[in-house]
Image (cartoon, rainbow, N blue to C red):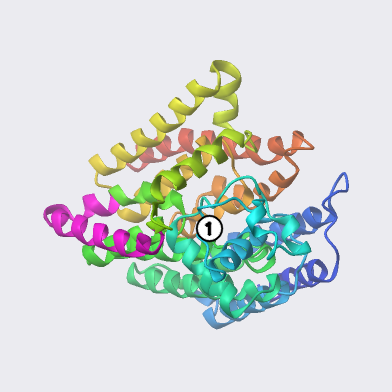
Amino acid sequence: MLALAVVLEAVFVVLAGRPNAANSPLPRTLLWLSAAGLFYLIAVALTLRGGAAKGLRLRWVLLAAVVFRLTLLPFSQPLAQQAHRYRWDGKVQQFGFSPYAYPPRSDMFSPIRSPADAAVPNPQVGATDPPLAELLFRWNYGWSQGLRTGKILWVVCDLLLIGLLIRMLRRRELPVAWVLLYAWSPLAVYEVAGNGHLAPAATLLAMAALHWAERRPRWAAAAAVAAAMTQWFAWTLAPVVLVAARRRWGSVLAVGTVVGVLLSLPFWFFSTRFMLPVLAGNVRLYLGGASVYNASLFALARNWFGLHTAAILAVALTVAVIIAVCVRRLPPLRAGFLIVSTLLLVLPQVHPWFVLWLLPLVVFNPEAPWLYFSVAVLWGYLAGAHPWGVLVEYAPLYALLAWQAWRRPRAAKQAA
């Protein structure tokens, strides 16, 4: 395990010291990350073995996780450009504007626009992130205006998430060494410390909500709504928290409503203009201009039935899974795992960092298909230029899911 940690660190050192070859036919960055993914999967296999986890010292797992993230903090040329959008939204708020009111390319921003702002993605659309995310962008820009130092907040959230996962593993009497499945993941290290994504801020709150769902439902409601106010995907987990509350659902709903109102209150009005229709318009404009990217089931349904039918089928399948896990009253962590994994299969766009929504849940549901996908999904950055990259991601994923579905009934029958 020590040798594997050293090899992973060596890969991250190489990545931190070289420019990103995003425009090359086969980016070397992805080859290095694939090598890291291979060693990561070996470490996962050793960790999940019967007695291996008991002998694995937690302090070494955590030390390696911290070193990995500190190594990639100086990485300044990420494949994704979302960090530029986070910085822009924080910047316009510091100058007294609502990020939802005007798109980045608006002429009124000419006095504050700098050459670095040319990299802001979707400049024709106003902000589409939820209110708590926008508040975090403003706070982050207030103390750090650089892209490198701006990643510190997300890395701190990532480390707090690792600490929460350890607490949850202990609570459920599972080996704490299983936290390695998230802590050593090249996807988590690269997308958070390297690309500077805010996903850990949302997943930290979402995991806290699922952790508290059965014991502290009001706390869970507050955390669930805060997570949804950070990234939209977390709304799919709200029914799980509500069902887990059982007879206390009324107070849980009230707490969630109050938290949602308080977090969104700073953005309700801008110059006497009610902003909810503006936000809805931004989301509609963004979705209208977004192409299908690195999708699996949605892409197939669109090719067979058309775009609108594919969207209806995706929503219907997600709702069906949510209803099924709630009716069966599955444990919150299992229910959340099934909902988010379904979401990744039916979304029209699956950026690699979307898998960070699922990866903390994989710690408690260590299934081979999704462990593989957490490594292979980074090839999604080539999906536009090289369609074969989608096969590298999804063909083994669906094969493993089919094998798992076939094997599970047989194993249950043998056990009976």
Question: Which is nearer the eye, 47 or 301?
Answer: 301
Q: Residue placed at 44% from the left, 54% from the top?
A: 365
- How many numbered marks does the figure carry? 1
What's the amino acid at mark 1? Pro
Vertical arrangement, residue 388 with respect to residue 415, above or below: above
Closer to us: 386 or 67: 386
With 104 as the anchor, is 328 left or right in this view? left
Identify residue for label 1: 99
Question: Magenta span has 253?
Answer: yes
Figure quadrant of the N terminus: bottom right
Magenta region, residue range: 240-267
Picture coordinates of residue 41 (x, y %)? Answer: 64, 58
Q: Is residue 214 above or below residue 322?
A: below
Residue at 35% across / 50% down in the picture?
A: 237
Task: Name the residue located 71 percent from the left edge and 39 percent from the top edge.
Answer: 392
Question: Is residue 158 in sight in this rendering?
Answer: yes
Is there any visible trace of residue 52 in the rendered image?
no
- Which residue is outermost to the left? 247
Residue drawn at x 57%, y 17% as measured from the top left: 304
Q: Is residue 109 above or below residue 310?
A: below
Principal SS element in the magenta part?
helix
In the rendered image, residue 355, in percent from the top left (x then y), is placed at 56, 51
